[in-house]
Amino acid sequence: MLAMFSWREDPGAQCLLLSLLLLAAWEVGSGQLHYSVSEEAKHGTFVGRIAQDLGLELAELVPRLFRVVSKTHGDLLEVNLQNGILFVNSRIDREELCGWSSECSIHLEVIVDRPLQVFHVDVEVKDINDNAPVFPMAVKNLFISESRQPGSRFSLEGASDADIGTNSLLTYSLDSTEYFTLNVKRNDEEIKSLGLVLKKNLNREDTPKHYLLITAIDGGKPELTGTTQLKITVLDVNDNAPAFERTIYKVRLFENAPNGTLVVTVNATDLDEGINKDIVYSFNTDMSTDILSKFHLDPVNGQISVKGNIDFEESKSYEIQVEATDKGNPPMSDHCTVLLEIVDINDNLPELVIKSLSLPVLEDSPLSTVIALISVSDRDSGVNGEVTCSLTPHVPFKLVSTYKNYYSLVLDSALDRESVSAYELVVTARDGGSPSLWATASVSVEVADVNDNAPAFTQSEYTVFVRENNPPGCHIFTVSARDADAQENALVSYSLVERRVGERALSSYVSVHAESGKVYALQPLDHEELELLQFQVSARDAGVPPLGSNVTLQVFVLDENDNAPALLTPRVGGIGDAVSELVPRSVGAGHVVAKVRAVDADSGYNAWLSYELQPGTGGARIPFRVGLYTGEISTTRALDEVDAARHRLLVLVKDHGEPPLTATAAVLVSLVESGQAPKASSRASAGATSPEAALVDVNVYLIIATCAVSSLLVLTLLLYTALRCSSPPPEGACGPGKPTLVCSSAVGSWSYSQQRQQRVCSGEELPKTDLMAFSPSLPPCPVSRDREEKQDVDVDHSVKVSNFYSFFPKCLFHSSMFPLFWKYVNS
């Protein structure tokens, strides 16, 4: 029991209390507390203010999951969470805990969470005198020959006391007798040898039996005693007892020695002769059953050998009492002691215990975060029991020694779940034996994801082609972004980056499905209204906070032939929708009478117009034709008096779409005499300008155009050479592409591929500007004379085309010069 005293009234007690407080403060600073308690203390006995000594607030004990853990004695001591006091919870028996060991303590681990902390507390169990001395036998029979001389000593088995220290120091006393005295010796091995010494000769005839009482008294306060009764039978005659060569035999034996291993040979001699000299060896009758089960004694030659399992961890030494008895009558005997020291070998694997795992571990956890607590032990002793721990190499964790054989598994470097999502760690405990033994334990550490990766598209920009007049709600493209995170951090949703497209919101044109990333056109798109719709789609994950990225979509609306040719407003002087023209009868072949003008809102082939003259009523031939691509109505021959005075010409304007769309223009041509149409005559005279003058004008235009194109070519070559010499352009870069020259014999004349140039930039190919050149292919005339007249009339147009084409090689024919050429040809 703990000593109770009033420290307020006793100055010495106050000094003692102060010393204890200083000692406790020093122990807390060093990471370990020491308390003491007497064995057999009552339930509730105060041990120490553990929470206060550890620097913990009482209010924190329950929220932080304060708990006391003991490896093998968890129910002996307990902590009151209301006041933080460590008290005795159940009966503590020092002898049951520690046996004969001089030091006995209970090791406690104090663990608190949030954050995780571990403290180590040693509670020393102090011995009290609660065990009385005990003799092996309550009655001891001795046979002593009457011939034994005074001074003869008879070995006795002493008493044992389970206590330690002064409580186990024994003294012996013997009842008063004139024949015997008690002899106690202490040798250098701290072993007490108890013997009965004969003081005077025995006389069997006077006293055949002697009854003595031996009392053992321990050194405790109060002292406890134990007794044994000696029943001495006096034997007759056999004068000499056997004598061992040595009183004590000291032997060392390795544990795990195989059965039959010779331990030692004891030898005794007898001075008698004959049968009184024959000696029989035997174990002392007081030997424990444990020794009898592990060792065998040959009764003839005195050899002690192994016959059971010898385990150092079970017992480190054995004390064997051997008796040599002759065959005399009465027999005489002698005793010796064999002190057998067991030598430890490295036969026990280290033991690993992993507890208090903090899993999973967030990938952004700070360094030195405690992952697990590890304790190691080895039942061997010395270097065989010295254990070192190591961890699987090349992992972002390390082991930190906290106290003796206790380690913490902590984070040593940054984690990245996207690189490694889990670690299989192997903790190896290796002892210091030779050869060393080891044990391993596996720890699976899962890395928990944090939202540290934004969704990523495979391209920064996509180019999409959609035909106009698409059905509402049609799927035009699917965007896809990948997030390297996991679970909700990788759950990607898509949305439009809203903006204005002209006067309308982007969301009125397109929408994107939040989960699948499918982009839909909400309404029919019109190429003539919107050629290019450029917008961004945002991908955002479901993490906290969410991360996102954008991708650009360029949606090109492809043209369809959905617009018919539209005729331009007739000139003043027309009747209704028809154009009225006055033509003198004196004009010759090739005279331009009128020109039909039309436009098409479409692009490319869909906007490329051709003109056809519808045949007259009744199959009558008319002296007029229309230019296939110019729309100019001209005479096919010289007019004469037989031609009708009025002609109604129907010109069919047709585009090249699939299917083609058409429009019809009506032209009223009135033939008048030369004096009645001065304006027409002047126009005819202007149209009859000599071919030489026209060629002069053409040459001037061609020279100017040639100089401009040549200068542009030289500048382009210089820039191209400079770029090639500096560094190659990055793959997928946007830049001006080479013009593509396309020839076709299906139609005749030159044409622009689109009314408006479009520049498309993608990551796969360079943008292109298309230019199509068509060889002349005019429809044939019905008779050879008309063909000759037609060729004469079209000479001006053909000369313009051939002269312009002859000055420009195909490889230099750039689309930027084509509108000038087209304007010139149509003029």
Image: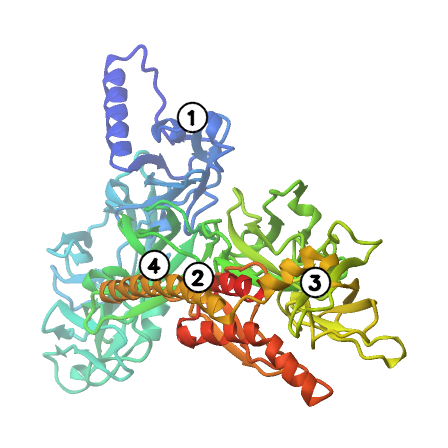
Mark number, residue 594: 3
For marks 3 and 1 on the same chain, the one whose residue lies earlier in the sequence = 1
Q: Of 611 and 799, which appears nearest the observer? A: 799
Q: Nearer the viewer, mark 2 or mark 3?
A: 3
User: For the residue carrying disc 2, how many other residues have a C-alpha within 10 Å: few (<14), some (14-19), or many (20+)?
Assistant: some
**Labels 2 and 3: the sequence-earlier one:** 2
Can you give x and y, in whole percent of width and height, for residue 819 in the image? Answer: 52, 61
Q: Is residue 617 left or right of residue 733?
A: right
Mark toward the viewer: 1 or 2 = 2
- Residue 422: mark in rendering: 2
Question: Circle 2 sits in a helix, a strand or a loop, which is it?
Answer: strand
What amino acid does circle 2 point to? Ala
Scheme of image coloration: rainbow
Residue beneath label 4, please? 136
Q: Distance of mark 4 from mark 1, alpha carbons?
A: 54 Å
Amino acid at circle 1: Glu
Tell me the CA gap for discs 4 and 3. Answer: 148 Å
**Viewer-side label of 4, 1:** 1
Among numbered discs 4 and 2, the one appearing first in the sequence: 4
Quadrant of the frame with the C terminus: bottom right
Point 34% across, 28% down: residue: 53
Number of on-image labels: 4
**Can the viewer see residue 516?**
no
Mark 4 / mark 3, whichever is N-terminal: 4
User: Closer to the observer: label 4 or label 3?
Assistant: 3
Q: Position of residue 497 (x, y in %)?
A: 58, 46
Kind of residue at disc 3:
Ala
